[in-house]
Amino acid sequence: MNTRTTHEPIIRMVNIEKHFGSVIALAGVSVDVYPGECHCLLGDNGAGKSTFIKTMSGVHKPTAGEILFDGKPMHFDDPRDAISAGIATVHQHLAMIPLMSVSRNFFMGNEPLKKIGPLKFFDHDLANQVTMEEMRKMGINLRGPDQAVGTLSGGERQTVAIARAVHFGAKVLILDEPTSALGVRQTANVLATIDKVRKQDVAVVFITHNVRHALAVGDRFTVLNRGQTLGTAQRGQITPEELQDMMAGGQELVALEESLGGTI
Amino acid sequence: MSQTAQSQTVSDERVKEMSALRRALIRPELGGLVGIVAVFAFFLLFAFDSGMFGSQGVMNWSTVSAQFMIIAVGACLLMIAGEFDLSVGSMIGFSGMMIAILSVTLGWPVWLAIVVTFVLCIAIGALNGYIVIRTGLPSFIVTLAFLFILRGFTIYLPQTIERKTIISGVRDVAEGDWLASLFGGKILTGFFTWLGNAGLIETFERGTREGQPVVDGIPMLIVWAIALVVFGHILLTRTRFGNWIFASGGDAEAARNSGVPVSRVKILMFMFTAFCACVFATCQVMEFGSAGADRGLLKEFEAIIAVVIGGALLTGGYGSVIGAALGALIFGVVQQGLFFAGVESSLFRVFLGIILLFAVILNTYIRRLITGER
């Protein structure tokens, strides 16, 4: 695990600050992500997790600070720039469009084209074929590539989104609370997908506020609280209880946890 | 290749096989197709002898349907992209009036008047879209404002300049103009003369035009309608941009996150809707030879109704240009058919309300089928 830190990080976020009017959402956050690691970003609601990953994926521009991608400073004007650089985001609820077919969703924003004379058309045959292939690899049986995403379960939708990102050559995959709305078995599927993706040397940034999900797949853990990092820990250097305490940012939870029998 | 992929797929016991009926039901055009069959069956039964299915009758309802189709194509793509345009009717009145004022009152060449009007109207469409995107307001409200603004100018301008609300004389100045003939002319006139001579279609039996066919060609209006439907359908189903239209209307945020330029797509669709309204207005002005301040009244709603009958969802993200065209055809056939059948024409509105209600209920049901919501 530690050998990974000898590589160059694929993405370095240095002292990122983001202000929304008078609200300081991020007050100098630094995180490095290495290829092939699953970097968990933990924090309670309002800690700045979403703002941080939106900065990483080009949705927000940082007020101050620097983003180094593959060692070079990057300035993303919009998410398309970040996507073409190889940073893909799978959002909590906003990953897929339920009314559209799986294959249209899979290629949304990256439609394969075929030329007929001077005109370019959406290559549906190729899109359908690739979609079926990729879905089978991830263990999802589709009725057909024209099946609407709305008929898939939450876990399957996340898996489609992850498969899509990896297919399009993501070097950094940002997962924004992919497991928060899922059942136990679906969560296990998504975590297994993360593991598969990591083995392909993709850097995974896994945002969650569930410590158990984080510990199940994470290599390193960074805790955000009120717009600042509380430090990064290696796997094995930190206990679930310590992580939980850091996220909650205080000791109140300890008393509560005792009365609940340690189930949080 | 896909054959082997199919056979390798292990069937999941929890994925129910879909019946052919259910599969057909989730096609957006289904409602429109059923409607067409019902409407034609009805009028074939009750109005067959009225001349509705003679050459002149066919041309009559085809022309009316083509008018609906032109604006329905624009409204359809815009609705699938998740927005409405209520200013279509006023845009029709406004652009017709602009052409008349520029060509008749100011004496510009007709082609220049048409080009300038198109540019102006498409710019207004872009402004509509820009305001909707920048403010985040519902397009319903923004375009409602433009409904009044444009209608107001359409009445004010001719009143101030000419002291009347109808400007005529366009046909005289448009005589021989190359661009005007693209909107007001007819094609296949030779073919129709041949049909008339061969006795296949009705010809005039008396008068100065004796021997000539009653229907002497296909108006450019119908050509435009077909061209726009074909263009819209291919754009929507066969291109990358079409996928972006679906995505923008289905979930703008998700589309944006996937790198779809949602704002550009929506603004372009507003511009396309304005373009369609302008085509409608130009054809109408060339046909009537005049522009009136009340032209295009209520057309925005008729366009939206045709689109909804055609299976599009009011909430966006789902629909079909072919469906919208079928909706427009139902519209035209019923409106003119009731006239041929000798039914009181006010009943058309009753029919319209009822069919709209049915279409929306059916669409909501179909949406549940597609997304598996309960």
Image (cartoon, grey):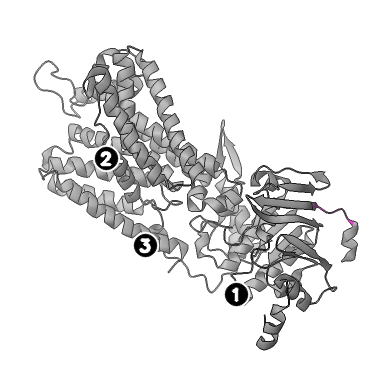
> Disc 3, disc 2: CB below 8 Å?
no
Q: Residue at x 39, y 58 (%)?
A: B24
Q: What element carries label 2?
A: loop
Q: What element carries label 1?
A: loop
How many numbered circles are shown? Answer: 3
Q: Nearer the viewer, residue B223 or B103?
A: B103
Q: Position of residue B150 (x, y in %)?
A: 33, 32
Q: Which residue is drawn at 24% across and 41% down?
A: B332
Q: Residue at x 35, y 45 (%)?
A: B324
Q: Which residue lies under the disc numbered 1?
A: A183
Amino acid carrying mark 1 in the image: Gly
Q: Which residue lies under the disc numbered 2?
A: B298
Outermost residue toward the front?
A22
Q: Nearer the viewer, residue B77 or B166?
A: B166
Q: Which of B157 and B114 is in front in this view?
A: B157
Estimate the spatial distance between the alpha carbons at disc 1 and disc 2, rounded to whole Å.
50 Å
Q: Which residue lies under the disc numbered 3?
A: B365
Q: Which of B20 and B72 is in front in this view?
A: B72
> Can you tell which quarter of the image residue B77 is in?
top left
**Highlighted range, magenta:** A7-11
Q: Position of residue B114 (x, y in %)?
A: 37, 21
